[in-house]
Amino acid sequence: MSDNEFKENMTEDAAKQRRADMKEINLLRVRLNRTRLLMGIWMAVAVILLILLLWDKLRDRYYGETVDAPEVFTEELRLDGPEGLSELFKENYVRYLKKAYVLFGTYPDCSYYKVAKGVARDDYDFENDFYTAEGERYRNYYPNGVKSGRVAVDVSTYQTNVDWDMVKASGVEVAIVRTGFRGYGEEGKLVQDNQFEANLGGALAAGLECGVYFFTEAISYEEGAEEARFVLNQIKDYNITQPVVVDTEKIAQEGVRANDIDNETRTQALLGFCETIEAAGYTPMIYASTAWFCQAMDIAKLGKYEFWLAAYDTPQFPYHVEGWQYDPEGNVPGIEGNVDLNVWLR
């Protein structure tokens, strides 16, 4: 073989080797890119799973834990077992039920109302963290022993000639004043509370933070909005820094126009009030008892608004509250007779 032939063969072999090397390199690049793609997919899946896990934890913290349960509860648990063990079964079972239902009465002789999903829950320990501290006149909220609530009174036509300076000096910080009410009858006339101006003006002059409330008998969205406009016209010249409240209750007498409307109708009436108040730049709030909140309205549609709960024993209420009316017969210096007392949580 001549030198030229040898060199040509060497060049050809080198070219073949280079092509083989490039093919191997390209193959390695393909495998590397495929590996990177798979790793990216797995990392994305891992991140999504982590986000879902964190969201689940945050949701439980904010909304509280719920369990899947039927809309209507019909079964009673059989609690057979050795002495003492059946009571433990019962205690745990009732604890489970309360994650899904609000119970009225003592198990098993009670009624059940399913807890609405999507409505914020609270983490208050009503049994241990709400009390009247030594040296204090009124009940308050003391998580970890630190005062975190405020004292509020709500007043209406039944509280006259109030000495608001004395009220404030006793430790009251917030006053919620009734603006008026809708009449019970078919006409449903809107009426201003005859102590509204005296009570609101006096409380503000004494330096209390003030909100207002209106007793509703609305039976439609339009009537709820009408009530809200009535209130807005009354308060336009006052410094209202606390919520504008719609008070909804069942009245124990015949001929009350809103007692027997269905839950959806009542919900729409409350939405009419709250949406109108919110659109005017004020904070809407709903006042009701535990039973009325759970039995008389669609709370899932109202859960974004603040709640003021009337409960005169330890509350068994699963949802957020910004006010707790705990005593309808309170005694406050400067107010003749009884007055409602509240722990204000906002």
Image (cartoon, rainbow, N blue to C red):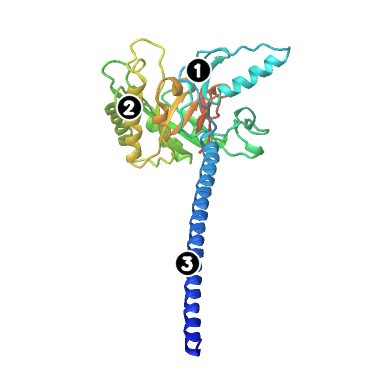
Q: Earlier in the sequence, mark 1 or mark 2?
A: 1
Which numbered mark, 1 or 2, is in the foreground of this view?
1
Going by the image, does 252 lie left or right of 234? right
Q: Callout 2: few (<14), some (14-19), or many (20+) C-alpha neighbours within 10 Å?
A: many
Task: Specify the farthest residue to the front.
Answer: 1
Query: In this orientation, which residue lies closer to the viewer: 40 or 207?
Result: 40
Other-residue count near label 1 (Cα within 10 Å), few / some / many at <14 / 14–19 / ≥20: many
Of residues 25 and 12, the one nearer the viewer is: 12
Residue at 43 percent of width and 41 percent of height: 241
Determine whether 168 is above or below 21 in the image: above
Q: Does residue 318 appear in the picture of this structure?
A: yes
- Report the mark closest to the observer, 3 or 1: 3
Q: CA distance from mark 1 to mark 2?
A: 24 Å
Q: Based on the displayed image, in which of its 4 quarters is residue 96 positioned?
A: top right
Residue located beneath label 1 in the image: 112
Give the vertical position of 34 relative to 116 (above or below). below
Residue at which label 2 appears? 268
Say which residue appears at 73% left-offset and 12% top-offset: 82
Q: Determine whether, in the image, residue 111 is placed left or right of residue 182.
A: right
- The outermost residue toward the right is 83
Q: Which marked residue is nearer to the observer: mark 2 or mark 3?
A: 3
Q: CA distance from mark 3 to mark 1?
A: 68 Å
Q: Secondary structure at mark 2?
A: helix
**Amino acid at pointer 2:** Gln
- Distance from disc 2 to disc 3, alpha carbons, whole Å, reads 68 Å
Disc 3 element = helix
Q: Residue at x 34, y 41 (%)?
A: 237
On screen, 20 above or below 135?
A: below
Q: Amino acid under label 3?
A: Asn
Q: Is residue 159 visible?
A: no
